[in-house]
Image (tube, helix red, strand yellow):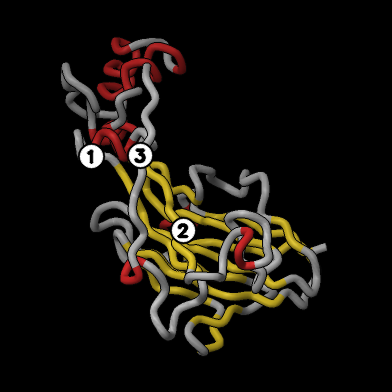
Amino acid sequence: GASFLYRWKATERSGPGPSDADTVPWLYHSHVDEGRDVASGLLGLILVSRRGAGGAEGGGRVGRPPSVDRELVVLFKVFDESASWYLEHNVATYTKGVAAVRERCAADGEEAEEEAPYCEAFAEANMKHAINGYMFDNNPYLTMKVGQRVRWYVLDLGTEVDMHGAIWNGNTVLQQGARRDQLELMPASMQTAEMVVDNPGRWMFKCQVTDHSLAGMIATYRVD
């Protein structure tokens, strides 16, 4: 492996506009083998602050504007594990091997292929409906306290299956002045929402598309 240092010049037009919050999100991901790289997790986020609003010059911690107490980044994405660079490793490590996978496909009445993803059922099982890479409420860290000002960066990246509705139970958010409890997401979209937390408890946060939430695109956030 290797490591690289990239530097970008953040221009005014890459920062917040007049109606934006004082930080805006930008997605980045690999374009070398875009499908496989993204399916393997090679993607991330860059936050650009309005001049004077972020880091030490804004009076806050480096990377966090003083206008908020907490920042949370959430990615809604269906990861296709069959397209991942790790597919062969995963089959060898977490199944009884390629032959066993093909036998299972045949047992289910499908014609097993020699090459991955072997059959339709196996391919469908590898479509992981995730929030930040976690499924079925196994996310570790979405916590906050009553009275905190929380900024949510809600991201979406993928294909035509990645049309999501991010919905919060228990609390609401403001987005460009509108009070909401749900954001509509399209592939390669980035949205920012502000929450002033006023309702303690453990609350559901999920995709409102029914088959996506049933497939695992569901999390909770905790308010102390």
In this rendering, the answer to whether 179 lies above or below 209 is below
Residue at (34% x, 50% y) in the render: 8
Residue extending farthest front: 57
Decide which of tag 2 and tag 1 comes sooner along the chain: 1
Query: Which quadrant of the structure image shows residue 184?
Result: bottom left
Of residues 150 and 93, the one nearer the viewer is 150
Residue at (56% x, 87% y) in the render: 179
Of residues 68 and 95, the one nearer the viewer is 68
Of residues 182 and 104, the one nearer the viewer is 182
Q: Residues within 10 Å of mark 2 (few under 14, many from 20)?
A: some
Residue at (46% x, 50% y) in the render: 215
**Mark nearer the viewer, 3 or 1:** 3
Compute the Cα span from label 3 to label 1.
22 Å
Residue labelled with disc 3: 6
Q: Residues within 10 Å of mark 1 (few under 14, many from 20)?
A: some
**Mark nearer the viewer, 2 or 1:** 2
Compute the Cα span from label 3 to label 2.
15 Å
Q: Position of residue 27 (x, y in %)?
A: 36, 54
* Placement of the N terminus among the 4 image quadrants: top left
In this rendering, the answer to whether 203 lies above or below 4 is below
Residue labelled with disc 1: 35
Tag 2: amino acid: Leu
Residue labelled with disc 2: 47
* Horizontal arrangement in the rendering, residue 94 relative to residue 145 (left or right): left
Q: Residues within 10 Å of mark 3 (few under 14, many from 20)?
A: few
* Horizontal arrangement in the rendering, residue 27 relative to residue 141 (left or right): left
**Mark nearer the viewer, 3 or 2:** 3
Q: Tag 3's secondary structure? A: loop
Decide which of tag 3 and tag 1 comes sooner along the chain: 3
* Placement of the C terminus among the 4 image quadrants: bottom right
